[in-house]
Image (cartoon, grey):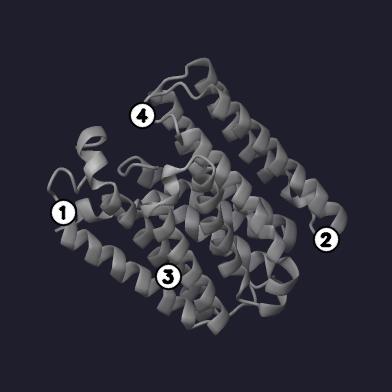
Amino acid sequence: MLKSLRPYLILMRPANIVTAIADILAGISVAGFLFKGSIAEILGLVLATIGLYGGGVVFNDVFDRELDKVERPERPLPSGQVSLKQASLLGGSLLVLGILAAGTVSWESAGLALLVAILALTYDKYAKHYVVLGPINMGLCRSFNLLLGISISLLALKSYWFLGFIPLVFIADITLTSQGEVKGKNISSLYIALALDLLVASTFVVLYFYTDYELLAAAPFILFWLFLNLRAKLRAIQQNEPRMIMKAVKAGVLSLIPLNAAMAAGFEGFISGLIVLALLPLSLGLARYFSVT
């Protein structure tokens, strides 16, 4: 049975989904509710992001099926392991599940989930074909996913909505890096991505001065996140070929977990950061069996 489910799991990118769960837990920590929040609401938001992210990446492959016949023929849709109808039904069901699960927390959470679903579909169908619009669109998906976590407290959402700019910048960074996955030769994009890494790192210092963010508690997670990204990007610049660029993209996606841990630790303490970071081994384990894009 597991073998028959594998093509569907490949479409859903399980290792990536774990990074989306990290967004939610970071948002809940920003709100100060990781320990004192309702378990039902926390689980509702986690289920929401699983549906939204899973549905979004399934539709990415649905819209890319013709291109994948040429560039990635081994994927479930071009290889015929999953039909177009089956993939569309899976993606649609996951998106609906995500919105309904968010609705168990609040109407505001449901609205954010609906917005994430619309942004994901917009990216899949249109925005990713544009050099500037694509990274921004993808970044907004992650921004509102973080805000979905913060929405466990509407008061916190009103106070910390601007934190959505952090994943916006970093996902734009990863999307820029990924533009060379097929053909390579994206050194200029990698240098811009490096600059964005440093911009994100400096943002945490700004948070320390203008909010209740505890930089000392977050510092180990920030440094770990920065190390993962700088090392991978510098290697991709030295060997500017698809294989190394894909490794840099993979490192960037997986490093979303320590990035989220840095937010959690800064706003709710070092232990909250460790809890979020504990998702990294799970994501790494899944990445051994499922691609990270």
Label 4 – label 3 distance at C-alpha: 33 Å
Q: What element carries label 3?
A: helix
Q: Position of residue 111 (x, y in %)?
A: 52, 76
Disc 4 target residue: 182
Residue 281 lies, with reference to residue 250, above or below; the image says: below
Query: What residue is at 46 percent from the left and 46 percent from the top?
Result: 281
Q: Is mark 4 on a helix, strand or loop?
A: loop
Q: Residues within 10 Å of mark 3 (few under 14, many from 20)?
A: many
Judged from this view, the residue extending furthest toward the right is 209
**Quadrant of the snapshot with the N terminus:** bottom left
Q: Position of residue 129 (x, y in %)?
A: 41, 43
Q: Position of residue 120 (x, y in %)?
A: 43, 59
Would you identify the image quadrant in which residue 74 lies? top left
Q: Residues within 10 Å of mark 1 (few under 14, many from 20)?
A: some
Q: Reading the chain from its start, which is encountered first: label 1 or label 3?
A: 3
Q: Position of residue 182 (x, y in %)?
A: 36, 29
Label 4 – label 2 distance at C-alpha: 42 Å
Viewer-closest of 47 and 88: 88
**Quadrant of the snapshot with the C terminus:** top left
- One can see residue 264 in this view: no
Q: Reading the chain from its start, which is encountered first: label 2 or label 3?
A: 3
Label 1 – label 4 distance at C-alpha: 23 Å
Q: Reading the chain from its start, which is encountered first: label 1 or label 2?
A: 1
Tell me if 225 is positioned left or right of 100 in this view: right
Disc 2 target residue: 211
Q: How many labels does the image show?
A: 4
Q: Which mark is residue 167?
A: none
Q: Residue 47 carries which label?
A: 3
Which callout, 4 or 3, points to the residue nearer the camera? 4
Disc 1 target residue: 82
Amino acid at the residue labelled 2: Thr
